[in-house]
Amino acid sequence: MIHLPVEPGSAEWHKARLGIPTSSEFSRIFTPTGRPSKSATSNKYACQLIAESMLGHPVSDYESDWMLRGKDLEERAVSYYELQTDRDTTSGGFCTTDDGKVGCSPDRLIGDDGGLEIKCPSEIIHVATLLGLEDVLVKHRLQVQGSLWVTGRSWWDFLSYHPDLPPALMRIERDEEFIAALEKHVRAFCVGLEEMRERLMVAA
């Protein structure tokens, strides 16, 4: 793993992500049930990544109200986690595989073995998570298992946090079979991505 200690959302963070697939977008390549994503065959994600690398900036900076809310609450969620678990965490920055071709942005890294994913959803989704009606292990499987693959870590804690409701905290272990399948498809996507870049260079 290569760890870049950049501030999430900063110009350096955006630059590090340009043109490479990241775990938060793995659903555009693979599905939580272990099958190729239909959107991967449309080449839209590949074209987006190529455009970003050519332009030198993201093609979309859109942030929903819920994404902004999550940023506002993240420090409170981290404080809760550290107090609850008696663990210190560090900023995840941006991480890539050793070849720099695939990346992820952990919310936090924990020691040498763990990571933390924080979600600050609506009241309805959070209560559904508390009741076990929202299957976060499936819904966020690609992002979490993808982060475990990229970082090489052993486990990832998942925290659903709402400031006015009880939190939901769970430990997610590596699923080696799923990670192997995910890596296979993401690597194949990367090969196709490079072929498309080469076609553009020849055309130019």
Image (cartoon, rainbow, N blue to C red):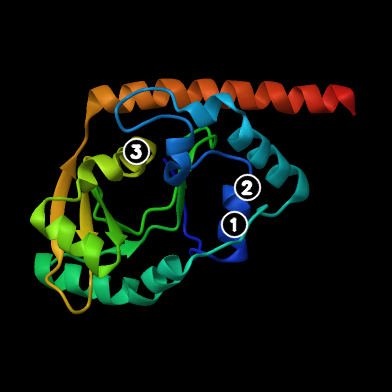
Judging by the rendered image, the residue that carries numbered circle 2 is 18
Which of the marked residues, 2 or 3, is nearer the chain's N terminus? 2
Residues at discs 1 and 3 in contact (Cβ within 8 Å) = no
Under circle 1, the secondary element is helix
Q: Residue at x 27, y 77 (%)?
A: 76
Query: Count of labels shown?
Result: 3
Relative to 112, is 43 on the left or the right? right
Under circle 2, the secondary element is loop
Q: Position of residue 122 (x, y in %)?
A: 29, 67
- Label 2: few (<14), some (14–19) or many (≥20) C-alpha neighbours in 10 Å: many
Query: Which of the 4 quarters of the picture holds residue 14?
Result: bottom right
Judging by the rendered image, the residue that carries numbered circle 3 is 142
Residues at discs 2 and 3 in contact (Cβ within 8 Å) = no
Under circle 3, the secondary element is helix
The CA distance from mark 1 to mark 3 is 21 Å
Image quarter of the N terminus? top left
Q: Nearer the viewer, mark 2 or mark 3?
A: 3
- Label 3: few (<14), some (14–19) or many (≥20) C-alpha neighbours in 10 Å: many
Residue toward you, 88 or 9: 9
Q: Residue at x 63, y 27 (%)?
A: 193
104 vs 177: above or below: below
> Which of the labelled discs sits on residue 14, or is there none?
1
113 vs 124: above or below: above
Relative to 57, is 202 on the left or the right? right
Q: Nearer the viewer, mark 1 or mark 3?
A: 3
> Which of the labelled discs sits on residue 92, or is there none?
none
- The amino acid type of the residue labelled 1 equals His
Residues at discs 2 and 1 in contact (Cβ within 8 Å) = yes
